[in-house]
Image (cartoon, rainbow, N blue to C red):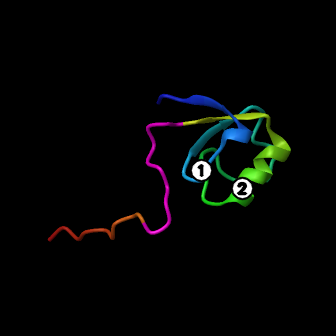
Amino acid sequence: MNKKQVPVEELRVGMYVVELDRPWLGTPFDFQGFPLTNDEQIQSLKVYCKSVFVDPEREQWTPGARRPATQNV
């Protein structure tokens, strides 16, 4: 995995957070890795972190962009 450190001020919806600049324990984030899907998540990260690590190769999340699953017959 290729990860890139990003200041929280530069975070945008669609980025995939893989690591914080502090332990996950003690933050409101349940998962160790998640896509940023709204501005509220970014604001919350700003409270707890100065920077985070994102995976630039991970699929960028955008509302409605996912295709429906295809059924293998």
Residue 70 in view (yes/no): yes
- The quarter of the picture where the C terminus appears is bottom left
Q: Is residue 51 left or right of residue 16?
A: right
**Residue at position x 76%, y 47% in the image:** 45
Q: Is residue 60 left or right of residue 47?
A: left
**Residue at position x 79%, y 43% in the image:** 25
Query: Magenta segment range?
Result: 55-64
Question: Mark 1 sits on what residue?
Answer: 34
**Real-space CA distance between mark 2 and mark 1, rounded to the nearest whole angstrom:** 10 Å
**Residue at position x 49%, y 60% in the image:** 62
Residue 53 at x, y = what percent? 63, 33
Residue 41 at x, y = what percent? 71, 55
Q: Is residue 64 left or right of residue 32?
A: left
Residue 64 position (above or below residue 32): below
Q: How many marks?
A: 2
Please give the label number shown on residue 41: 2
Q: Secondary structure at mark 1?
A: strand
**Predominant secondary structure, magenta span:** loop
- Corner quadrant of residue 33: top right
**Residue at position x 79%, y 52% in the image:** 44
Residue furthest left in the image: 73
32 or 8: nearer the viewer = 8
Residue 30 position (above or below residue 66): above
Residue 29 in view (yes/no): no
